[in-house]
Amino acid sequence: MSKEEDNKAIVGRWFTEFWGETCNLSVVDEVAAPDMLLKYSLHEARRGHDDIKAFITGFRTAFPDLNFWGTADLIAEGDYVVGQWEGGGTHMGPAFADFLVGSLPAASGRKMRFTGTTILRIENGKIAEETGLDDGVTALTQLGLIKAA
């Protein structure tokens, strides 16, 4: 396989096992660089295995049905892989204060469903950086954290 195909396989596994219907935390140790940087507009940036595991554990505890899936084929060039996705979940868990613009009280029952595009950089066979541009306005409006115009 080419470097690009290898990188797409790594990212495909990450999308399925980390962001998919269930989360396999061991995938962080297996495919993420030890100092991986995870950046999305809705949350503070996260760095390193422990910080990323804590983030996803809290996110999935607050949104037990959290799930994201690809909506187009992955695109790879050199060290970069780009993916389009859709997903969301229902806030049925404890209070959640990880959004940059506000917090949700426990079990608010609010649902979010939104889309995004993510760029991942692969270094030495590991994900070194994941930067996502998501439709945070849609998600935050659905969650009642911002008002629609």
Image: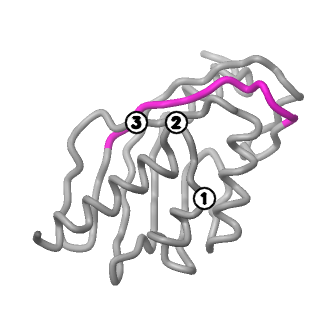
* Left or right for 41, reference 17: right
Disc 2 element: loop
Disc 1 element: loop
Image x and y of residue 98, in percent: 76, 47
The residue pinned by badge 1 equals: 25
Which residue is drawn at the image coordinates 57% and 64% (left, top)?
26
Q: Residues within 10 Å of mark 1 (few under 14, many from 20)?
A: some
Identified by mark 3, the residue type is: Trp
Q: Which residues are magenta?
A: 84-95
* Left or right for 55, reference 108: left
The residue pinned by badge 3 equals: 69
Distance from the alpha carbon under mark 3 to that under mark 2 = 8 Å
The residue pinned by badge 2 equals: 21
* Left or right for 94, reference 138: right
The image quadrant that residue 59 belongs to is top right
Seen from this angle, which residue lies furthest left? Answer: 1
